[in-house]
């Protein structure tokens, strides 16, 4: 790492020039967005995008999301935008929303993993927006984590993991949302959710009247299978410690107690309300049961704490698979590699 900048309070103009220089020279920048931190580089440069894949140890068939500052930049990067796509852009951008569109040749083939499409996202976070706007360069940026690990939502969580793999780190404080963007592709005129995120199924239905959810979200996909969103094939969001997800139902607490009998040296990732019930165990509080926004914000930091606790397993309290809860459960199911108690 060459530079570490603290922009929690405001963006420093001199440092901004340095960041832009690094990007123009095909370097890598860890940068905040409202969802999770990204590892960003020039989306128009094969060399820069190749560095992202190497830094993350990412599978080459898994394309990157390209971040833009405004609608004109989208038009520079993609071919046809139909009426439904236009409506989705106008409703959800800027914000935690990624739309898969047909790419123009200017976007690096490395970024699109040699495919014809590219995910476009216009973040609302002002740090990344300013860097894109001032450099006038669209930024390819996957989540800031080594592939397979939980996404990074604050610098403290990722600095050790990534500091030797990038040129600049920008600290913008803890991410507001904490869970990644919703990835959508319009297929046969129907917006289809390829990865659930902060924007929910209901939000999309309200905006354009229809929505579908990809069938692969909660199933284990074979590595050689062809799926709409390649990222869903890979083990993800997982601590090194074994994790067990306990689904939300009337037996949730009893089920946790049963697992504790089998694994006395466990930690629990659970709701604030249940902390007292498990006061004799290591406990990571992720927020109140009903406060899904708070839980989304804390989930990756909680998963990253597990390995430090030196326990045999982490037992995780699940939420209902509705609204934002569906996105949280999608991450948890994958962190637990389908070890689920219902
Ligand atoms: O909130 C976010 O989206 C964060 C921040 C940094 O913007 N980015 C992020 O990127 O989560 P990443 O690379 O970790 O996840 C991108 C997901 C993967 O599951 C990938 O397979 C899918 O989006 N994806 C990207 N481009 C795609 C494409 N052209 N077609 C289908 N799926 C695509
Ligand atoms: Mg990721």
Image (cartoon, helix red, strand yellow):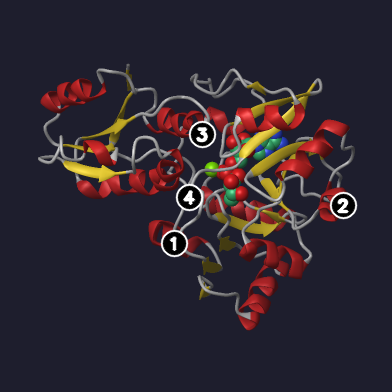
75 sits left or right of 260 in the view: right
Residue 229 shows in this picture: no
Q: Earlier in the sequence, mark 3 or mark 2?
A: 2
Q: CA distance from mark 1 to mark 4?
A: 11 Å
132 sits left or right of 145 in the view: right
Q: Earlier in the sequence, mark 4 or mark 2?
A: 2
Residue behind mark 2: 76
* Label 4 CB-ligand 2 distance < 8 A: yes
Q: 272 or 72: which is nearer to us?
A: 272
Q: 162 or 186: which is nearer to us?
A: 186
Q: CA distance from mark 4 to mark 2?
A: 29 Å
Image depth: mark 4 or mark 3 in front: 3
Per the image, label 2 sits on a secondary structure element best described as: helix
Q: Position of residue 159 (x, y in %)?
A: 42, 62
At x 72%, y 63%, the residue is 132
Residue behind mark 4: 145
Q: 116 or 181: which is nearer to us?
A: 181
The total of numbered circles placed on residues is: 4
Residue behind mark 3: 324
Image depth: mark 3 or mark 2 in front: 3
């Amino acid at each position: 790492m060459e530079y570490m900048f603290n922009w929690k309070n405001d963006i420093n103009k001199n440092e901004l020039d340095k960041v832009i220089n690094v990007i123009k020279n095909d370097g890598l920048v860890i940068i905040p967005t409202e969802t999770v931190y990204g590892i960003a580089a020039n989306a128009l440069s094969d060399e820069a995008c190749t560095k992202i894949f190497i830094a993350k140890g990412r599978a080459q068939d898994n394309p990157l999301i390209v971040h833009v500052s405004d609608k004109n930049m989208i038009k520079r990067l993609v071919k046809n935008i139909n009426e439904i796509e236009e409506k989705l852009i106008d409703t959800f951008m800027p914000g935690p929303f990624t739309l898969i569109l047909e790419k123009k040749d200017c976007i690096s083939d490395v970024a699109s993993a040699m495919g014809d499409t590219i995910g476009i996202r216009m973040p609302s976070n002002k740090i990344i927006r300013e860097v894109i706007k001032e450099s006038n360069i669209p930024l390819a940026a996957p989540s800031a984590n080594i592939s397979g690990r939980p996404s990074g939502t604050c610098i403290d969580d990722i600095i050790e993991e990534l500091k030797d793999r990038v040129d600049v780190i920008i600290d913008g404080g803890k991410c507001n949302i904490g869970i990644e963007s919703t990835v959508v592709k319009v297929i046969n005129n129907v917006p289809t959710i390829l990865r659930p995120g902060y924007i929910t199924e209901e939000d999309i239905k309200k905006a354009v009247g229809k929505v579908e959810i990809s069938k692969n979200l909660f199933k284990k996909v074979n590595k050689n299978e062809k799926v709409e969103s390649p990222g869903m094939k890979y083990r993800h969001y997982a601590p090194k410690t074994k994790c067990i997800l306990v689904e939300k139902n009337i037996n949730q607490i009893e089920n946790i107690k049963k697992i504790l009998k089998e694994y006395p040296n466990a930690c629990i990732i659970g709701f604030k309300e249940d902390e007292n019930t498990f006061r004799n165990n290591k406990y990571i509080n992720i927020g109140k049961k009903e406060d899904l926004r708070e839980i989304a914000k804390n989930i990756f930091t909680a998963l990253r704490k597990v390995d430090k606790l030196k326990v045999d397993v982490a037992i995780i309290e699940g939420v209902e698979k509705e609204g934002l809860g569906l996105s949280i459960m999608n991450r948890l199911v994958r962190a637990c590699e389908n070890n689920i108690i219902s």
